[in-house]
Image (cartoon, rainbow, N blue to C red):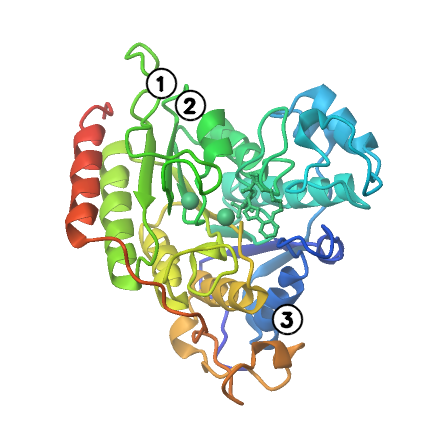
Amino acid sequence: MNGIVRPKGYNVSWHSNPDIEKHHFGHAHPMKPWRLTLAKGLIMSYGMHTAMDTYVSRMATREELEDFHSAEYMEYLKTAKVALPDDDNPKEFNLGSSDCPIFEGLFNYCSMYAGASIDAARKLCNEEADIAINWSGGLHHAKKAESSGFCYVNDIVLAILQLLRKHPRVLYIDIDVHHGDGVEEAFWSTDRVMTLSIHKYDGYQFFPGTGDLDRTGPDSEENPGAHHAINVPLADGIDDEQYVWLFKTIVGMCVDRFRPTAIVLQCGADSLAGDRLGRFNVQVQGHGACVAYCKSLNIPLLLVGGGGYTPRNVARAWAHETSIAIGCDANLNPIIPAHTPYRSHFRHDTIFPTLDQILGEPRPNKNPDKKIREIVASITEQLRFVNM
Ligand code: ZLV
Ligand code: CA
Ligand code: ZN
């Protein structure tokens, strides 16, 4: 079946739940859980599920959610009622805002994607998986007591808290086009988690408006979290060559200095070219090269999803990255199998749509090489302050 074989002595676990995909944020909202159906269809039509341990994930319990979130916020999230369109009540916990609408089944949706990330992290802790995958997770903006930017519960923080039960040091890497502010904030004061986010940054306009190069951790040197936040602010239009070079260079330096015993990679697909909200020119190949590089480090790896607002491209990237995880990427026929569900969604200018070819107006690259080198120089200097 398309050259898919289970890798010997290497376990990949895949955590998903079809009920997650059925939720709707609202007609005009860019977040479409249905993109997960498209990704799953592609993964399964290639037969990749046969090479992984597949789990239908369960809901996280209230106790598990309250490992990070406040009990008051979780209670409100559970009981929040879908508001009428003209209801302008004050928005507690930012719930009911246009970014974070209250929709039917919201609490179940949150509990399921969080349950999947928690289970995936536990598979790594028990050494039952070398790579664990939850494409429905990666919701990096949620705070202890606040929803933000389409994220209600921070499954990444919950997963890292699980990993910290066994692992002394966790490296969090975020390739979503937005700054991973919620995860950064949650681990701001500890030296057991290093956070690295690569994102579009223009000072204030592009959401969430944080993530400048100088944002490196708490100011006080006595605080163990000092220097453990790494931010890579980029301008529009970065291409594969620059992005992958930057990724490998910076992640390589972080691994050398911090020596993580587990890695969490948030694979937000809104950093791809042609994304409805994104601004970069990264291709499926370049995005996947980041996953391949993390895999090559041979450190337990958790892959989560994140943003991604052009569903056919999100599905392409996460299917390609699943193939990298199980090691069959080189053997895949790039032409999307004829029996793939919703195959017509992948067709644009060609009758033979491929896994790696995405359509998107190229954006002018506003990232001079000099700037890219300056970013690396600044992070090199920052890492000198991280104790080995
Ligand atoms: O990909 O939104 O700019 C992880 C992730 O990182 C804003 N929100 C907020 C701040 C005030 N505004 C605007 C509110 C708009 C509400 C609805 C949209 C609707 C249609 C098209 C675009 C948007 C939109 N919203 C674009 N950017 C925003 C951001 C939030 C981005 C979250 C990224 C989440 C899953
Ligand atoms: Ca990011
Ligand atoms: Zn994003």
Q: Rounded to the nearest whole Å, what is the CA distance between mark 3 and mark 1?
A: 44 Å
384 vs 198, nearest the viewer: 198
Residue at the top extreme? Answer: 222
At a point 45% along the width and 49% down the height, the residue shown is: 176
Quadrant in which the N terminus is drawn = bottom right
155 vs 283, nearest the viewer: 283
Q: Residues within 10 Å of mark 1 (few under 14, many from 20)?
A: some
Q: Secondary structure at mark 2?
A: loop
Amino acid beneath label 2: Trp
Q: Which residue is labeled 3 in the image?
A: 41
Q: Quadrant of ligand 2?
A: top left
User: Picture coordinates of residue 374 (x, y %)?
Assistant: 17, 42
Q: Residues within 10 Å of mark 3 (few under 14, many from 20)?
A: some
Q: Secondary structure at mark 1?
A: loop
Q: Is residue 156 left or right of residue 153?
A: left
Mark 3 lies within 8 Å of ligand 1 (Cβ measured): no
Amino acid beneath label 3: Gly
Q: Contact, CB < 8 Å: mark 1 with mark 2?
A: yes
Mark positioned earlier in the residue sequence (3 or 1):
3
Q: Is residue 288 left or right of residue 369?
A: right
Mark 2 lies within 8 Å of ligand 2 (Cβ measured): no
Is residue 58 in view?
Answer: yes
Q: Which residue is labeled 2 in the image?
A: 188
Amino acid beneath label 1: Pro
At a point 53% along the width and 51% down the height, the residue shown is: 307
* Figure disc tally: 3
Q: Which residue is labeled 1 in the image?
A: 218
User: Picture coordinates of residue 129 (x, y %)?
Assistant: 51, 50
Q: Rounded to the nearest whole Å, what is the CA distance between mark 2 and mark 3?
A: 38 Å
